[in-house]
Amino acid sequence: METIGDLALSISHVGSTSVPGLAAKPVIDVDVIVRDVEDEHSYMPRLEAAGFRLIFRDVMSGDPHRQLTFARPNTNLHVWSPGAIEPQRHVVFADWLRTNLTDRLRYNAAKAAASAGDGSARYNDLKAAAVYDIYERAFTADAQHAHDPHPRALVE
């Protein structure tokens, strides 16, 4: 991501488009870690100049972040500070789905069932049970990171 270059401590392609064989909406999800997500002046001008648009500013949670969007390709960019738990969960989840066919198929089935719903914003709610079960197995197998068994956000 040339746009923020040396300001990005890490960049991770997460979400369904990062997992071969997983059904995915045509949306790319990317987590970016910067030195301090609260210091928007250090990174936001570059992202906006490149065409990203801020759509969500989470300042109340334990892991504050910013979500930006980009039209083409359709991209959700999530900006976090070092140590944020949620981007660690995203990486563990995607890595697990890449290597675990059974859970990848289960998640595909949950996504298909959720997509067949009423088209509302309940998509994440409708697939949550499968996601939480998969998180449980993936996080139990991942001794490298501490995990809250009740994640607050689900990345598509």
Image (cartoon, rainbow, N blue to C red):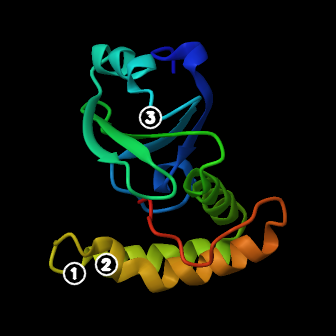
Tag 2 secondary structure: helix
In what quadrant of the picture does the C terminus appear? bottom left
* Structural crowding at the residue carrying mark 1, measured as other residues with C-alpha within 10 Å and reported as few (<14), some (14–19) or many (≥20): few
Residue drawn 39% across and 26% down? 40
Distance between mark 1 and mark 2 Cα atoms: 5 Å
N-term mark: 2 or 3: 3
Q: Which numbered disc, 1 or 3, marks the residue that appears first in the sequence? A: 3
Q: Amino acid at mark 3?
A: Glu
Q: Amino acid at mark 1?
A: Gly
**Residue 154 percent location from the top left of the image:** 44, 65
Coordinates of residue 119 in the picture (x, y in percent):
16, 72
Please tell me which residue is depicted at 51% across the width and 58% down the height of the picture. Answer: 62
Distance from Cα at disc 1 to Cα at disc 3: 37 Å
Q: For mark 2, what is the residue?
A: 114
Nearer to us in this view, 86 or 138: 86
Q: Are marks 2 and 3 in contact (CB under 8 Å)?
A: no
Q: Position of residue 59 (x, y in %)?
A: 37, 49
Disc on res. 38: 3
User: Could you tell me how far apart the alpha carbons at marks 2 and 3 are, in whole angstroms?
Assistant: 34 Å
Of residue 83 and residue 135, the one placed in the foreground of this image is 83
Q: Position of residue 71 (x, y in %)?
A: 24, 32
The one of 82 and 19 positioned closer to us in this rendering: 82
- Mark drawn on residue 117: 1
